[in-house]
Amino acid sequence: MAGKSAGEERDGVALTNLDQELFEDAGATKRDLVDYLDAVRDCMLPVLHDRPLSVIRLLRGQDRFMQKNLPKYTPDWVPRTKVWAEASHREVTYGLCNDRRTLLWFGNQRAIEYHPALMLTGSHAPTHLIMDLDPPEGEHFRLAVQAAKLVREALAGAGMSGAVKTSGSKGVHVFVPLDGQADAEQVAAATRAVAARAERLDPELATTAFIRDDRHGKVFLDATRSGGATVAAAFSPRVRPGVPVSFPVPWDDLDDVTPADFTVHTAPGLLGGGDPWASAMPAPQPLDPGLIDEGRTIPVARVQAMHEGKRRAKARREAG
């Protein structure tokens, strides 16, 4: 990279301040980010295509923030879609990262993390059932790996299968491709059931407890990645020391990797000219009706946690 100027143009996108460090402890510059996104674009663009995109940006000297609404200065050529946000009662204009030019533009905006919607624009059918495995504080990636195997076993019991990737942080994501026939409520219910079945396989290792204080050092089987939620995309960098990326791993190799193996510096060289996420992903499959039925008997975690929080607060007040 030596000898390049600080400002360049690539695919019609003016790239600026490329030699600035991304953030403290990043060990990477904005140039490294843009070069990484460009190197993995053939793998990354398919997982972003036609999905309303939220990004986490980190501007120099500021705290990170999640951007959903495209800023007013966004070029006209960036694809976009409007989505009604029930929580804020307003229409949000999301970007659609469908091409190299748009990906480079986001990179130049210091968009480090890429969190696409779980549904394609204009659709109400989630494309995947997703389980986010969040280990307790500390270096507990190995526990997340063991919990992922529980999820795999629970899925197999329902005649389903998925692919696995590092989250880019400390955990693991399991993605199960769906045939598009199930709506968001059905997928959410099925996800709760998968989590409950995985927990029953080894309750000493894994828990579905949404309230952190109730997890007692176990891996949290986060079944809330459904509906309007997002999850870090495969190949997305993360705002963590060393800028690790979320990277696909074959099930048989999970025991032999760590999140730090996959960074903006190392990941492009691990692609081998192919797309490991597409290669690992099973064919889209129907959602098991038994999972849906079981999941509908399980309370929605956030709602249950809200009521439990209120109950505990009341108990504390009454205790003086």
Image (spheres, rainbow, N blue to C red):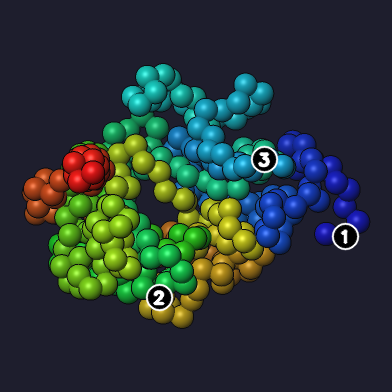
Report the residue at 40% width, 43% height from top: 230
- Give the CA separation, mark 2 to mark 1: 39 Å
Q: How many other residues sit within 10 Å of disc 2, few (<14), some (14-19) or many (≥20)?
A: some
Check disc 3 and report its element: helix, strand or loop: loop
Amino acid type, callout 2: Arg
Q: In the image, residue 251 lies at what x, y percent?
A: 37, 73
Report the residue at 29% width, 34% height from top: 124
Mark 3 or mark 2, earlier in chain: 3
Mark 2 or mark 1, earlier in chain: 1
Disc 3 marks which residue?
Answer: 62
Report the residue at 69% width, 55% height from top: 24
Specify the label residue 2 is tagged with. Answer: 1
Residue 63 appears anywhere in the view? yes
Report the residue at 29% width, 47% height from top: 224
Amino acid type, callout 1: Ala
Specify the label residue 142 is tagged with. Answer: 2
Q: Quadrant of residue 314?
A: top left
- Give the CA separation, mark 1 to mark 3: 28 Å
Question: Which quadrant, please, contains the N terminus?
Answer: bottom right
Depth check: 226 or 5 in front? Answer: 226
